[in-house]
Image (spheres, grey):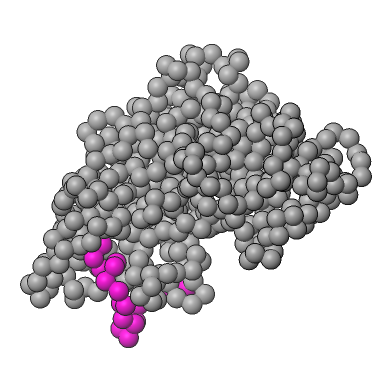
Amino acid sequence: MRVALIDSGLDVSRYQGVKVDLDLVVGEGSLIRERRASEHVLTDHGTTCAAIIAKYAPGATFCSLQIFDSETLRAVCDNFVAALQWCYDARIPLVHLSVGTSLINDYWRIRPIVAKMICQRQVIVAACSNNDRFSIPACIGGVLSVKADTGLVDEDFFVNDNSAYGLFSASSYHSLVLTSGNEYITDIANSFAAPTITAAVHNIMSGHKERSMSVPELLRALLNRDYIQCFHKPDFISDAVIFNPHGHPIMKQHLFFTCNREYEGFPNTAALEEGCDAVYLSDSGTDKYEDTVGILKFFDMHNCNLLYAGALPPDADFMDRTSLTWCEGSPGDVVCVYTSDELNVEFPIVNIMGYGLAPMRLMCELRALFIADDYQCVCLCDYPFSYLYGFDHIPDNMERHTAVSFVAQAFTPDVLICCFKDDQGNKSRSDDEYYITLTDYDHDTSIDQDANHSYTVAVYDVEAVPLLYKKITEYFLIGENQ
């Protein structure tokens, strides 16, 4: 079975048994072509990954996509995205990535193509960051993320139940035989643990028709038991049909996924579109248990990856689903895996206070401005359905300082935008943070208040957003610190 390996290229003379079907380079302008004989593989990183996979999965045939052109193992994001797009177009069933990025803004460029690949049942195995930070694409829901475990050797691995980051712990200790006959022992690194999982996945998938297994089905076969799906965010959703029988207001222009259609009734076959994911907006006050279970079974029967917007009833188990599912309160919907109360927060925090959709709309618009100026920006919010807009969702039982601590340790952003229900009546304000209060009436938006670190703006005053952005950056002196 074909395995795409996006890395530093393959030197087939180094190891026997590494079979290469296509040897490609992502070159200038992110154009993909065959690697020329004069273009040498400058590092053995990719070759070593392939040799590990081939040792445990000798039936693997590789499509090599070289994205690194130097020994520093650094590549531009455009080349990485181009390689993923090639894998999507070629429908490669299994994609190995001992590469990734911790730049938050790269998420918005990499996530869409990864989600499309997951939607057409391509399996992606990715190494986590070696410094335990949020990394992409390993931390995207539906990707099989891998960390090294120093106590494991050869093909050993185990699954980390209820862990949003690092689905697998695997051996990165491998004894490889070079073509010269000498032995090479791999380093302890996530890069060399991920191939252990790729080999195991290959051996399971090779017994099935290509792209016939969903991630939950693959995990059950790999582990020989049920597994609780555990994703931090529902970011495996790509092109989706939104089912909104309760008429919840949503901001379609700011959704993190593509909405192909909004259907204002309960799920039915006629409303589905071929190859689409599904988003169901629930109403915990009116949705009955039997209806919820029926909804889960309906989408599962149609092989739809599902974002269930709301909390499932406690007994509505979805362990046996064949497609990816996320809901509020699922195991990955807890960010405290990274938290530390003693962590120092050394980045600007913008707090938005208001009600309804307006605060989330302002968060989206400010985030877009920060990203456009290349600031690494994260949004935290505990409002209903806030995850629909790509925010990090904060469960109701999590305190604000715990959530901010999570962001500090996992992301280390340039700026954090927060919106919490409990902050609405907060009169105690820190000079180290900026506060925006949304009102439902018109007024002079040029008025600063509270020692120049608070700003009041009318809910519908769109023209105030660029002015707000300017005042925020001036207040924190972001421009001078770059």
Q: Relative to residue 191, is residue 246 depicted above or below?
A: above
Whether residue 22 is visible, yes or no, is no
Give 369 or 456, whichever is nearer the viewer: 456
Residue 466 screen position, x and y as percent? 79, 54
Task: Please name the residue shown 56% across and 26% down the image.
Answer: 396
Q: Relative to residue 216, is residue 296 depicted above or below?
A: above
Q: Quadrant of the N terminus?
A: bottom left
Q: Relative to residue 71, is residue 285 depicted above or below?
A: above
Give 245 or 408, whichever is nearer the viewer: 408
Give the side of residue 250 with respect to residue 413, left or right. right
Residue 332 screen position, x and y as percent? 44, 35
Residue 428 screen position, x and y as percent? 72, 34
Give the side of residue 168 with respect to residue 338, left or right. left
Give 410 or 79, whichever is nearer the viewer: 410
Task: Please name the residue shown 46% across and 25% down the image.
Answer: 296
**Does 48 lie within the magenta span?**
yes
Whether residue 394 is visible, yes or no, is yes
Give the side of residue 296 with respect to residue 465, left or right. left
Task: Please name the residue shown 58% across and 19% down the image.
Answer: 284
Q: How many marks?
A: 0
Task: Please name the residue shown 30% across and 77% down the image.
Answer: 41
Give 67 or 136, whichever is nearer the viewer: 136
Where on the picture, by quarter, is residue 429? top right
* Extent of the magenta region: 31-50
